[in-house]
Amino acid sequence: MKKVLITLTLALFVQVGFAQDTFKEDVKKYFSYSGQSAGLEIVKNDLSSNVPAEKKVAFEKELDVSLNNLIESLADLYMSEFTHEEIKQINAFYETPVGKKLSSKNEFLLNKGQEISGEWSQGLIELMGRYMN
């Protein structure tokens, strides 16, 4: 009887662990669909370009560990705010034609959005300047 209980308990832990792994993989799939993974890759490339060639391999190795830790932490955050079913539904959207279009436009929209925000902030600075004096 004791062996049966131990076996059932272990099987339950393995099943829960597997479900969590699947959930986390689905969150990471969302990161890819939404452009977050690509954004991190851009940051990685930008950072690496500032490192001397003779140190680049070691730097990128440590940076990869750091980025993987960041991704794990972000995945945990999403897992605390969304159910696995909700993440599956979000991913299903990204697999539709309009979701694929959105995903393909992420980088362009981000860059243009930054440009528009920069122009807007210049106007805001001028506005604030008129009222701060």
Image: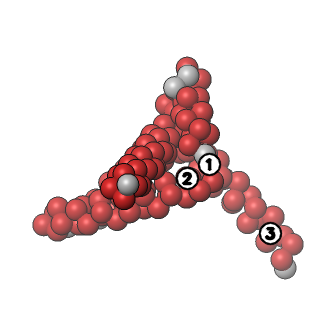
Point out the tag, 1 or 3, that comes first from the N-terminus: 1
Q: Residue at x 48, y 37 (%)?
A: 33
Q: Which mark is residue 113?
A: none
Q: CA distance from mark 2 to mark 1?
A: 5 Å
Q: CA distance from mark 2 to mark 3?
A: 40 Å
Q: Residue at x 60, y 33 (%)?
A: 89
Number of other residues with Cα within 10 Å of mark 2, as a class: few under 14, some 14 to 19, many 20 or more? some
What amino acid is found at the position of numbered circle 3 in the picture? Met
Name the residue beneath numbered marker 3.
128
Q: Position of residue 110 (x, y in %)?
A: 55, 45
Q: Nearer the viewer, mark 1 or mark 3?
A: 1
Number of other residues with Cα within 10 Å of mark 1, as a class: few under 14, some 14 to 19, many 20 or more? few
Name the residue beneath numbered marker 1.
82
Q: Is residue 8 left or right of residue 59?
A: right
Q: Residue at x 55, y 58 (%)?
A: 77
Q: Which residue is the extreme one toward the front?
A: 1
Q: Position of residue 126 (x, y in %)?
A: 76, 65
Rendered view: 29 above or below 100: below
- CB under 8 Å between callouts 2 and 3? no
Q: Which residue is the extreme one toward the left?
A: 54
What amino acid is found at the position of numbered circle 2 in the picture? Met
Rendered view: 63 above or below 92: below
Q: CA distance from mark 1 to mark 3?
A: 39 Å
Q: Position of residue 40 (x, y in %)?
A: 41, 53
What amino acid is found at the position of numbered circle 1 in the picture? Phe
Q: Nearer the viewer, mark 2 or mark 3?
A: 2
Disc 2 on helix, strand or loop? helix
Q: Which mark is residue 79?
A: 2
Point out the tag, 2 or 3, that comes first from the N-terminus: 2
- CB under 8 Å between callouts 2 and 1? yes
